Amino acid sequence: MVQKAVKHNFQVHLSGIIDLLSNHLYSGPQVFVRELLQNAVDAISARRNEDPDHEGEISIEAIEVDGRPHTLVVIDNGIGLQEEEIHRFLATIGQTSKRRDELLTRTADFIGQFGVGLLSCFVVSQEIVVITKSIKPDSPTVEWRGHSDGTYSIKILDKDIAPGTQVYLTAKADSAEFFTPARIRELCEHFGSLLPYPIKIVNGTRKNIINESGVPWERAFLNQKDKIAFLKKYGEETFNISALDCIELRSQVGKIEGVAYVLPYAPSLTGKRTHKVYLKHMLLSEHAEGLLPDWAFFVKCVLNANDLRPTASRESFYEDEALEEAREELGNCLRRYLVDLAENDLPRLEKLISLHYLAIKAIAIQDDELYKLFIDLLPFQTSLGFMTLSEYKQRSGVIQYVRDVDQFRQVSRIAAAQGICLINAGYAYDSKLLERLPAIFPDLEVELIEPSMLVQQLEDLDFDERERSFDLIRTADVVLQPFKCAAEVKKFKPSDLPALYSANDDALFKRTIEQTKDQANSMWSGILDGVAEDIGRGYSQLCFNLDNSLIKKMCGIKDRKLLQQTIEMLYVQSLLLGHHPLHAKEQELLNNGMIGLIEYCLRFQTE
Amino acid sequence: MSEVDNDEVWDLVEEAMDMPDGPAKVGVMEQAVRLADALNDVETSYQVRLNLLEACTFGGYPEKALVAFAWCQTQFDKDPERFEEHDLLWRQKWIIDKLANFPQFSKQQIYEMLDDMARRYEAWGAGKRSELKLRYSIAYAMGDKSETRRLMGEWEKTYRDDLTDCEACEVDDLVEMNTFFGDYEGAVKAGDVVLKTPLRCMHVPHTTHARLLKPLFFLGRYQEAMQNHRKGYPMIRDNPAFLCGASQTLEFLVLTDNLGKATKVLEAHLSWATDTKELWMRFRFYLSALLLLNTLLDRGKETISLTLNQTCPYAEPGGKIDLKVMRDRMMKEAEAIGASFDKRNENTYFKDWMKEHDSYRNRIIHVPLKSTVEAR
C-alpha cells in the first residue's frame, strides 16, 4: 500500500535558522558530520537501553555521480523512528529555534535532538531524506523528505527495512567539497575516532572501520609499561609531539578521563593553553581552554568528559562550578604525578624541570608542599652562572639575591669577580619564591641585596692607601654632588675596572624622571616633579677601584682641574658602561670633558 | 662606547612580553628601555617605551607609566609624522585615569592634563565619551558623588568610538560606580552583564568578581558573594595592579568572619600596598587591613604573625607583630594620606570614608569558605 505523500510545513523560518547555525554558532559547515554521527550514536544507545546485547553499527558512504560528489548516506541500526516521533522532532525544531541554547547544546530529549542534528545538514544540503523503521513492533518504514525551503513530506513505504535509520543528503552545489569520500572519511575520523560503536566507511566495495582502536586510555593492557608506551604513541599521533612523559587524568566531577602529555619544549608563559577534548566521546574541540589550572602549562592533554556542559557553540565547556571542581581534580592528578616523581624518580623530575622550571615555579608559589619538594631542584640565574638552589646552598650559607635584572646587571660582574654568588631574582616568580624561603625553612638565611650593600662588602683600604687616595675622594665628592652621587674608594677585582656605578630602584627611577624632564614641556615638568617628590631619596654611588692602575695614577694628580675632569669622565664612562642613558647635564660633562682632555693633550704637544 | 644593539633590546622586550604582569615584567621592560636609550635611536626608544607603559599600567606602576608617557608624548609632539598617533592617544587615557590617585597632583594640574587630552582626542576626531568617563572617574576618585552622577549622566548620552574603552571595561566600571552610590542592586545587575555574557578584557572579569563582593554581601547574597571570591581571587592574587581587588577581598573575608584567611591575604598583599606610589590604592588597602586589625583587637588578640617581605616597613624579624602597635601606626599613616587627599580635593571624603569603613566592624556575619575548592 502506498500512501499519498502529504505536504507539511515546518512553521518556522528555516533559512533563518540555517543561517544562524552556519554563520554564527558553528565553527564551520563541516559540523554536519558530527551531528549525523551524534544522531546515529544516540539512536544506537537508545536501542541498547532496551536491548543491552544489541551490537550497534554505523555505516557511511559518499556516493559520486559522474565523478562528482553527490550524495551522502548514513545508516545506523539504532532505535528507529515512528511517524509520530518524526512529527515530534519537527515540533522540537520549531520550539528550539527560539532558544538557541537548546538548539545547540543538545539538551532536548533524544527525539528532539535528532531533529536539531538534522537541521545542521541543511547548511550543506538542499534535500534530506530519512528512511527509518522503529524497533517497536509493527512499525512501518517511514520516509521523510525535507527541503531547505522549509517544506517536507512524510509517507509510509511499502518496502521493509531492518530497524534503524538511513539518512540521505544531497550536496548543495557550493558544498560539494564536503561530500568527497576522502573528506568524509577525514571528518568522521576527526569527530568520531573515540565513539563507542564501529563506524564503517564504505567506498564502493571497500569497507573500513575508522574507530577500531577505541578509546586509548580505556583499553586493557598487560602492564603499566605497555599502557604508557601505547598512550605515548597516541600522543605522538594526536599532537605531533614526542612527549617527555604522559600522565593519566581522572576526575569524578564531570566524569572525565584522559591523558596529559608533558611537552618536549618550554611553552610560552602567556600563550594559550589548549587541549583536545571530547564530550561523551564525540570531539568537542581541539583547542579547548580552561580545563587545567593556570600553572599547568607544561602539559597538553586529550580527554573525554561524560558530564560537563558544552558551550552554545559546542566548542568548549561552560564555565560553571562543575568545571571549576573538575579543574581542581585534574590539577591534583598532575600534582600527584609531580610528587611521585620527586619521591621515586628524581632523574626524570630533573629532566622535566630543566624544560618546565617556569611552570614548576608557578605552582610552587601557590602550594607549600610542592614548594618544599621542588625548591632545591629549581634553577636560578646567578653571578656564577645557572645553578639549582641546592647547588647554591652548597656554595654559600646565606642566600643573597637582587630584585631586578638591572641591579643584577650592575653588580653581577663584580660579584662574580669576588667569588660572590648572587641570584638574579628579576625574572618571573623568582622574587616570590625566594621571599618565601624563610617562612618555609626557618633555618635558612636569605638576604635581599641592594647594589650598595654589595659595594660595602668589597675590600676596604688600609691606612696608607686611605691617605694616598684622600684627595681623590674629596674632589670626587664635590664633583659628583650635583649628580646626587656619592663617592667611595675600595679595592676589588677585576682590576681593569676603574670604577663601578651602582644605584637602587628609586635612584634609577629618579634618573629616568630627570631624563624625561630634560625634554618635556612645562605642563609635564610640574607633573614629573610631583612624581619625583614621592620617591625616596634614592641612592647612587661611584666606587673607585684602587687596584686599578689608572686610579692609582689619579691619586697622584696634583692639577686640581685635571683631576676634576678625569673624575667627571670616569663617572660618565661608568654610566655608559652600565647602559645608563645620560641626561642633559651628563651629556654636557661628556662633551666638555672630551674637549678638555683634547686641549690638555695638545698643550703637551705645543709645549 | 656601548656594545648594545637593537636585537638585544627586542630580545629583552620579547622576554618581558612572555612574563606575567607584575614587577618582574616591569623590571625587564625598564632594562630594555635603558638599553634602547643607550642606542640613541629615538624610534626604538619610543616603541619600547610604549611596551613599558603598558607593562606598568597592567602591572601596578602608574607613576612609571606616567613618566614613560611623558617621554613619548614629547617625542611625538616634536615629530608627529614619525609615530602612530592612535597608539599614544589610547594610552593617554590610562595616564589621566590615575592622576587623581596621587595627592601630590593639584586639581589644576589634573584638569590641565585632562584638557590637553580632550583637545588631542577632538583633533583626532573622537567624541567626548572617553573624556567624560575620565571626568566622572576623577570626580569619583575625589569622592564627589553628585558631580560623578552628573558627569555619568553626560557620559551616558555619548556614543562609543575608536578611542573609548571597550564595553567590558565600561560595564565593569558601573559595578564600582553603583557601589559608590550605594546602589547595590544596580552594581550586581551590571556585574551580571559582565559575568553572564562573553564580555572580556585585560582586567575584566578579574576586577568584576572582587567589585561584586561588597554589594552582594550587603544584599545578604552571601553564597553568590563567596562564589565570586572563589572565582575571582585566583585571577588577581599575583599581580599588584589588582591591589584594589585585594583590598576588596580582604574586607570581604573580615566581613564574613574568615579571619585566618583574611590574615593570609593581608600577608600576601601588604607589601603591594606599602610599595605602591599610588596612595589612593595604599589608603584603600589600609582601610581593609585596619578593619582586620581592629576586629582582631576587638576579639582580644594581642599579636599577629606575618611573614613579610624584608623591605616592607611593617616587617618584624621573627614575624610576630604587636597588633596594637601595627594598628596605631597604620591608622596614623592612613589618616595622613587621607588628609593629603582631602586637602587637595577640598572636602572631607577620605576622613568620612575611614569612619564609615570602621563601622563595618559591627556588620560581621560568619559565612564559611567552601573548603574543597578553596584556593591554596
Image: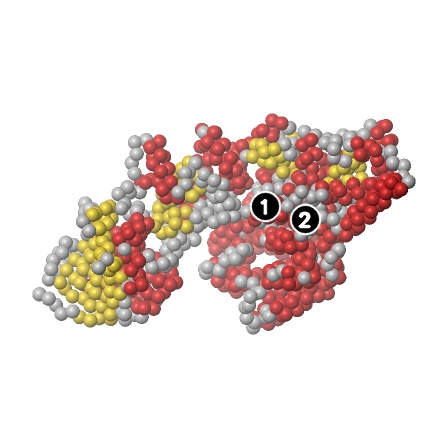
Disc 1 element? helix
Q: CA distance from mark 1 to mark 2?
A: 15 Å
Q: Please indicate, yes or no, whether residue B340 appears anywhere in the rendered image.
A: no
**Disc number at residue B11?**
1
Label 1 environment density (alpha carbons within 10 Å; few <14, some 14–19, many ≥20): few
- Identify which residue, B58 or B196, lies in the foreground: B58
Give me the chain letter of mark 2.
B
Residue A398 position in % (x across, y down): 65, 30
Residue drawn 22% across and 56% down?
A63
Q: Earlier in the sequence, mark 1 or mark 2?
A: 1
Residue furthest front as drawn? A606
Residue under numbered circle 2: B39
Residue drawn 33% across and 61% down?
A103
What kind of residue is marked 2?
Leu
Residue A49 position in % (x across, y down): 22, 50
| Quadrant in the picture for residue A607 | top right
Identify the image's colour scheme: rainbow, by chain, secondary structure or one colour. secondary structure
